[in-house]
Image: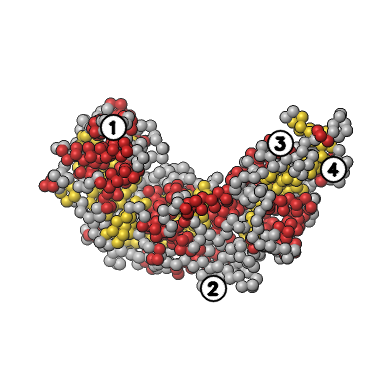
Amino acid sequence: MSTQEKVQELEKVVIRFAGDSGDGMQLTGSQFTFTSALLGNDLATFPDFPAEIRAPLGTVEGVSGFQVQIGKIDIFTPGDAADVLVAMNPAALKSNLHHVRAGGNIIVDTDAFVEKNITKAGFEADPTEDGTLDDYNLIKAPISSMTKTALEGLPIDNKVAMRSKNMFALGMMYWLFDRTPEQTEKFFEAKFKKNPDLIEANKRALHAGFNYAENVEALPSAYKIPPAEINPGKYRHISGNVATAWGAMAAAEKLGKKLFYGSYPITPASDILHELSKYKNLGVITLQAEDEIAAVCSAIGASYAGEVGLTASAGPGIALKGEAIGLAGMAELPLVVIDVQRGGPSTGLPTKTEQADLMMALYGRNSENPCIVLAASTPSNCFEYAYQAVKLAIEHMTPVILLTDGYLANGSEPWKFPQMADLPDIKPRMAPADGQPYLPYQRDAEDLVRTWAVPGTPGLEHRIGGLEKQDKTGNVSYDPENHEQMTHVRQQKVDRVANHIPEQEVSGSGDGDILLVGWGGTYGALHTASTELRVEGQNVDFAHFNYLSPLPRNTEELLTKYEKVLVCELNMGQLATYLRSSFPKANILQYNKIQGQPFTVKEIKEQVTKNL
Amino acid sequence: MSEVKETNGTNSTLTKKDFASDQLVRWCPGCGDYSILSAMQNAMPAMGVSKEDIVFISGIGCAARFPYYMDTYGFHTIHGRGPAVATGVKLSNPKLQVWQVSGDGDALAIGGNHFIHAIRRNVDINFLIFNNEIYGLTKGQFSPTSRPGLVTKSTPFGAIDRPFSAGELVIGAQGTFFARTIDTNPKLMTEMFTRSAKHVGASMIEILQNCVIFNDKTHGVVTGKETRDDYQLHLEHGQPMLFGAEKNKGIKLNGLKLEVVTIGENGVTEDDILLHDAHEQDATLHLMLIKMAPPEFPMALGIIRAVEDTTYDDLVEHQYEESKKNAKVTGMDELLNSGNTWVVE
């Protein structure tokens, strides 16, 4: 790089790309992300897009954003506030300005700041001229017109040419952060193999942006973010939904069974369906069912037939599946249900994140109907928990609900992936076809789990169903005492899963002044906040729950050890309520946010400090 | 071949008794379900399918208790969802012979969505609907097949819903097999069950069934000794649509409508009578036959429609085989290592 002398080193930086939902901001962000991952930076991403496919051009409602934090240190969140915002139009600036830290850099496409767009975005005057941005370092770049100039002579029309303006912006960012466009060029070479003009257009735009950034005096000096110290190993980039799909596939492969996925499209879970649909050759059957109920019921049918039955949805769909999950619990069949939580209630905020389905997962079925409930906490560990969900469902013959959320599902990070041989065995309890009369509801003494007899097995013909059943035989029974006994047995069976899951870990000194508690997708913010507070001299311990039902064996001991336990959740206090009712001796405080947005590190630090 | 299916074993040594479970059958005395159960247990040995490869799936209702009484694999699920569970079973293990048993409320009201979509996909499942035009287990409310004006606990002033029939839905959903039979005719039931089992694709049998408690004799005109000859039309593929004690009445196409004619009257000869073509792809005439009902028409019984078409389960299998041929990755380790990866030293 010719401007080597201007390069400054940074520990971490947060970059936010924002534009119309048709401007290709998600692609721009993911290209920047992947190039950075290859350079060895640690990172985390957060796409923030509207529910509408293409809301009207130039409106605030139609703005799509992508935030990524990259660093030479460990990165657990996409960052609280952006150091650099790329705003492709006034609406993108309007809806993203509050995400930029004071003094941060804002790059705007001045060609898009015409009166019509400015008004449409809700500004009274041109914000790049009227002092609105005085607190920031504003970089005005005529991105559209320079892209057009760069593409002159190519046999493509203006509309197509304008689709490359995001690459001009990306080129600028590559220069600014000392990385080369090489990886993105390769991406376009593969993507547009049959259309060399488009490859050329995108390459030209990239280079034009890169060169522009290098030559223009308005830009600050280039920054260098050296590689992070990352554990050695082989890495790939993965999003939460893909990791979820792969985790379930890995479990099915380990078992030597088919993976049956019954599903009905719903945001933000649909990508699991898209991903699984690709791998028919690996024994994955996907049924896009007529509704959510058929989706879960077909998965139950697959479990009954002896394969791995899986369904996923978001909150509204899980509500519809409730009765069927109850059937799987009653019949004592394995079933994995994934809830990619989104803002609610009802249709709520389909593309935004929330953690408000915990109570539904724990209790949202008629009568006494316990399920195992797990929650993933990073995009990549969705793999581990999806695998674990299948393992527990099959080994304990019971439904497992895995909670992820929109933030994990669409967020992504580098992942040091395992090999199949590293993954734990899964041991289904198959009924022996030994000529003895088969008792479908006879259980093992330790875990109270019944055996699995699969249609097609000679000699094990039997009937099961949703009616209350007699202990051992499974025959329909209305006997009052039998019902009470069976209700307790089904609960105890789930409770005893605690013997098969790890104890709850705590980070920090172990005798902190306060215990910070979270679950699920808020891990990154809570972990970073507690780490920073400790560096700043506060005695803060942190426990993040992945196992919610049953809770780890040491939970009570852990919570009652602290004078104060601060439970932070993106809901009105569901885990806090659950912990209070389970462990009345613990002093549970709560901090909640219900804005469809993840916690920022700053928010958590403030709350912990307030409660110290 | 739409009516020949390979079976994977033989159970020729089995008898009717081998298909009866040890459970006490708990339908009301005189319920039409008893004869349906008996006809099914009778039909089973001759089908040549091993007991362990047979699965009965049901939803909720009187009919849905059926699986408990068959000594095969059985799963009594939740209201209306039988077709969805059965779809999961069949796709997971296509070797199984899957039966899905419903009543008119289970299949056509709460489960209507699953019913039409299972038929539309043409999954190779045998569907039975016990149609007694009433809700029995919930103690007597009208159903989607109840006739207008029917006084029930929930319609003290008479039902005002417009009914529809299972057959109309099957045709609307592009079904490949539809048959109708009655609980008073064990021989016809056994034959229909056997033919349904042989049909490759979603087959649907409507069984006109009597609820002695809440809707007794709703099919009385069709089943009554005095009237049945005039109100039962037994269809056979390739045969003329004749009925009546003397087999002198028949169905004639008059313009775009069916009419009942008598041979020898008004110059009508046997040549005027329609020949039944169950294998015709165009379902127009099948729908007209399905809609025939007393008092103007006899009730059409037997196989009304049986046409060949690709099944969903075959297409699933086909995509699996095809994807194996073109697969870039053949296992999870390869998938994990595929695409863009990098090594940190």
Q: Name the kind of residue labelled 4 in the image.
A: Asp
Q: Position of residue A292 (x, y in %)?
A: 53, 48
Q: Which residue is identified by label 1?
A: A154
Chain where mark 4 sits: B
At 77% from the left and 44% from the top, the residue drawn is B236
**Considering only order in the chain, which callout, 4 or 3, is on the residue closer to the N terminus?**
4
SS at circle 3: helix
Amino acid under label 3? Leu
> Looking at the rendered structure, which numbered label has been put on residue A445?
2
Q: Nearer the viewer, mark 2 or mark 4?
A: 4
Does A286 appear above or below A584? above
Is label 1 or label 3 in front?
1
Q: CA distance from mark 2 to mark 3?
A: 62 Å
Pointer 4 residue: B229
Secondary structure under tag 4 reads: helix
| Tag 3 residue | B285
Q: Are marks 3 and 4 in one subunit?
A: yes
Q: Residue at x 71, y 57 (%)?
A: B47
- Disc 4 crowd rating (10 Å Cα; few below 14, some 14-19, many 20+) is some
The extreme top residue here reads A115
Which residue is more in the foreground, B288 or A311? B288
Residue shown at the point (29%, 29%) measured from the top left: A118
The label nearer to you, 2 versus 3, is 3
Question: Disc 1 vs disc 2: which is toward the camera?
Answer: 1
Q: CA distance from mark 4 to mark 1?
A: 82 Å
Indicate the chain on which mark 1 is placed.
A
Do the numbered discs 3 and 4 sit on residues whose CB atoms are within 8 Å? no
Q: Is residue A121 visible?
A: no
Circle 2 — which element? loop
Q: Residues within 10 Å of mark 2 (few under 14, many from 20)?
A: few
Residues marked 2 and 4, same chain: no
